[in-house]
Amino acid sequence: MPDDVARERLEFPLMPLKGVVVFPRTIVTLTVLRSDAISAVEAASEGDHRMVVATLRPSRASSASPSTAAGWRWRGRT
């Protein structure tokens, strides 16, 4: 990529999942109870309806951040 081409940084709300794996292009019903997950859904609903959906690593399942998410991530829509 040439140096003169600007790179756009995209940011999306993070939806942490505990004990659930969601495959691309599937529709699932999720029960959202944690305040950070509720905030992610609200932020996505107010914006373009996109968010990052990530399964938490088992050893760190009580916290939600990009560093505690499992290796595979994808965007989801609300």
Image (cartoon, rainbow, N blue to C red):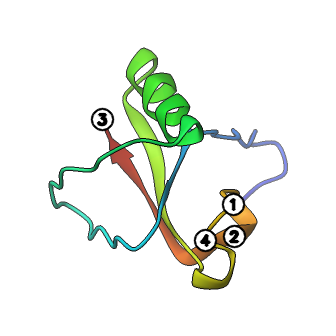
**The residue under label 2 is which amino acid type?**
Thr
Real-space Cα distance between discs 4 and 2?
8 Å
Residue at the spot x=73%, y=43% of the render?
A: 7
Q: Distance between the residues labelled 4 and 1?
A: 6 Å
- The answer to which of 27 and 75 lies nearer the viewer is 27
Q: Give the residue pinned by disc 1.
A: 63
Q: What element carries label 2?
A: helix
In the picture, measured across the screen, residue 56 lies left or right of residue 46, that is right
Query: Where is mark 2, residue-wise?
Result: 68
Q: Nearer the viewer, mark 1 or mark 2?
A: 1
Closer to the eye: label 2 or 3:
2
- The location of residue 38, given as percent across then percent down, is 47, 33
Neighbourhood count class around disc 4 (C-alpha, 10 Å): few under 14, some 14–19, many 20 upward: some
x, y percent for residue 32:
38, 42
Mark 1 vs mark 3: give the one in front. Answer: 1
Give the residue type that dot 3 points to.
Thr
* Residue at the spot 68% in from the left edge and 75% down from the top edge: 60
Asked if the residue under mark 1 is in contact with the one under mark 4, i.e. CB atoms within 8 Å, the reply is yes
Q: Closer to the camera: disc 4 or disc 3?
A: 4
Task: First in sequence, mark 1 or 2: give its number.
Answer: 1
Q: Are the residues tagged 2 and 3 within 8 Å (C-beta)?
A: no
Tags 4 and 2 touching, CB below 8 Å: yes
Whether residue 72 is situated above or below residue 43 in the rendered picture: below
- State the SS at label 3: loop
Q: Mark 4 points at which residue?
A: 61
